Each structure stands twice: as structure tokens, then as C-alpha cells.
Amino acid sequence: MKSFTQVKGIAAPMDRANVDTDMIIPKNFLKSIKRTGFGKNLFDELRYLDEGLPDQDCSGRPLNEEFPLNFPRYQGASILLARENFGCGSSREHAPWALDDYGFRAVIAPSYADIFFNNSFKNGLLPIILSAEIVEQLFQEMYATEGYELDIDLEAQTVTTPSGESFGFEVDEFRKHCLLNGLDDIGLTLQEADAIREYEVRRKQQAPWLFGAIQPE
């Protein structure tokens, strides 16, 4: 998993409440358990004017020119501004996978659905909670300024605007540690690789029949 320390990048809007996981990545694209390849279908039903198919080349598909992510000013955005209850709906890790694969490293919203919130941390995407009033301020500043960039510092737990105004956010210490060090569940487990090997050796001696060994008569 990619580590997250500090990200400075263009902010793009998803200016609607209750964006669910099927809107983030529609169910017909959930045919792979790889973490990559979903970015082209992020917000598929909003980005394109036709119906997308799995593994389809999207380069020639007709774009919805009214959808903000298709605006030239938001190309290359790495921070998504959203409204309350972002990521609601069914549970799917593909939602943070698609956001990350598109290029987003963080989402800023007043609130999230619990499962999406947890899945984001486990997949290297930072979901930041700021008050609705602050999020509204960021939206208005972003709309007023093309190329609007935010600076997110996970170590300091701050979001800083181009004017230098800074907002603090809360994050669980364990989740912060995992993001800073790029540790997903597998990475955390591998930190105990020596202890795991020692246990396996000891267990083989204690119960060899579990490992296919034949006990002497």
C-alpha cells in the first residue's frame, strides 16, 4: 500500500450529498479483485453519456461535459471535496480502489458511511472529516479559483488553503501510523513474520499430524 505523508494538489468537487458506492463504482464493474484498473470507471454513470462495459476502452466514449471531473480545470486533481454521508450504500472495497486508481489521495467531507470510511484507510485513501461550514468554505473558494490547491499534512493533521488558512482534523493514531508507513492488513501481518515462522515450527513439533506427517507406531 502507498504511504501517505503529505499531499498538495488540485481539489475537485463532488457537490452532492449521499453519494453511494454504486455511484462511485457501478456494480457491473466489480468483476476483478485487483486494486487497479477501476479509475477509468470512477463515477462512470456521471462521467459518460453511454453505458459502460467491463474491460472497455473508455478513451472514445462520449463524455458528459456537465460533470465537473470532465472539466479541464479539474484534470489531475488529487483531492476530492464531497458532501455529507459520502460512500453510503453497499460495502465494496472497489470504491476506494477506484478513487485511488483515478488519482485521488484524499477525500474531504463532513461525514462518511462507516464501511467506506474504514475501507479507505485500509487501502491508502485518507478520508478527512471537517465541519459542514468549513467544507462549504472550501467549495466556494475552489469554485472561485481555478487551479485551487489544498495542502494536506497527515503528520500535522492539517488541511491548508492557498491563502495559508489551516484547518485541523482528527485521525485515529493507529490508522495514522498505518497510512504514514504504507501498512495495510497484509503489511501489518508481515511485520510479525519471524514470530509466525517460529510458531509454525513449534506447532509442527507439537502436532505433526496437522502438517501431513505420519506418527510412528
Image (cartoon, grey):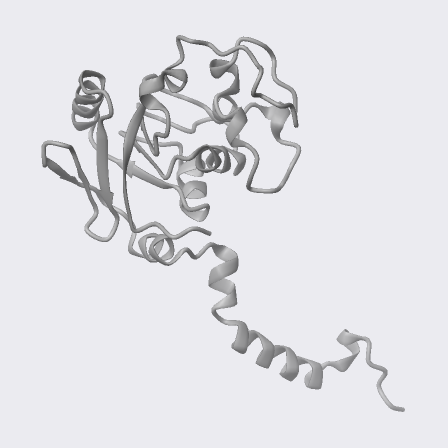
User: Which residue is at the far right?
Assistant: 217
Is 165 on the left-hand or right-hand side of 45?
left
Q: Position of residue 138 (x, y in %)?
A: 19, 25
Q: Position of residue 50 (x, y in %)?
A: 58, 10
Count of picture labels: 0
User: Which residue is at the far left?
Assistant: 164
Q: Kindly indicate the quadrant of the structure image that contains residue 68.
A: top left
Residue positioned 26% across, 49% down in the render: 154
Is 52 on the left-hand or right-hand side of 14?
right
Residue positioned 62% across, 23% down in the render: 57
Please determine whether, in this image, residue 28 is positioned above or below residue 207: above
Residue positioned 66% across, 27% down in the render: 55
Report the front residue among 202 and 162: 162
Is 150 on the left-hand or right-hand side of 207?
left
Report the front residue among 216 and 10: 10
Please determine whether, in this image, residue 212 is positioned above or below residue 86: below
Is 25 on the left-hand or right-hand side of 205?
left
Q: Position of residue 43 (x, y in %)?
A: 48, 21
Quadrant where the C terminus sits is bottom right
Q: Kindly indicate the quadrant of the structure image that contains residue 106.
A: top left
Residue positioned 22% across, 34% down in the render: 150
Q: Position of residue 7 (x, y in %)?
A: 29, 43
Please determine whether, in this image, residue 180 is positioned above or below residue 38: below
